[in-house]
Amino acid sequence: MNIINNVYRHDCRVLLWCVKSHSYRRFIMAIKWLSRSGDGYMQLLIPLILLCKDGQAGYDFFMIALAAFAVERSVYFSMKNTLKRPRPPAVIPYFFSMVTPADQFSFPSGHTMASFLLATLVIAYMGSEAFLIVIWAAGVGLSRIILGVHFPTDILAGASLGTFIGYFASWWL
């Protein structure tokens, strides 16, 4: 139990350090935009672009991405509704988030999980020339901490799970 308490204290410390940026209005506007880009738009747009652009290879990517996201969403919903970890504003006194989350639980981060799944699949499909998508996925995860809706360990879990699912799905690419 001591390990869990230490992780929780470190989680809170990192979260509170990250949200010091709330007073920088333009920065927060950019972070909100980055976070919104992880709402599922990119996860739909990129497979559709590759479907239209790359013929049979794009179709294969699209179908594998569809299956991988079905697995990812199932894992995400079952973990979130089983573990029921409250979001930072629910456990840290006088803390508020910059956006209203879709649900009340934080573990794992669904935005991060889906973003890292997409990044893993695109890297497997296109190779290292698509490295910018990994930077985008990391930015989506970081944005969720800065906006105050997730603890850092929620992001680490989401990134790990998304990468793991993407890695196994990419065997079929």
Image (spheres, helix red, strand yellow):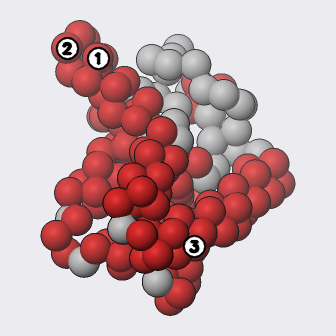
Question: As displayed, is residue 129 above or below residue 103?
Answer: below
Instruction: Find residue 37 and report its horizontal and vertical position in percent.
Output: 40, 35
Three-letter code, disc 3:
Ile
Front residue of this view, candidates 96 and 68: 68
Q: Name the residue under label 3.
A: 64
Residue at the limit of the structure toward the bottom, as seen here:
171
Question: Contact (CB < 8 A) between labels 2 and 1?
Answer: yes
Q: Name the spot of residue 100 as percent of width and height, x first.
A: 58, 19
Q: In the rendered image, which residue does mark 1 sit on?
A: 29
- Label 2 neighbour load within 10 Å: few <14, some 14-19, many 20+: few
* Residues marked 3 and 2 touching at CB (< 8 Å): no
Circle 1 SS class: helix
- The N terminus - image quarter: bottom right
Tell me the kind of residue under disc 1: Met
- Residue 28 in sight here: yes
Indicate which label's residue lies in the foreground, 1 or 3: 3
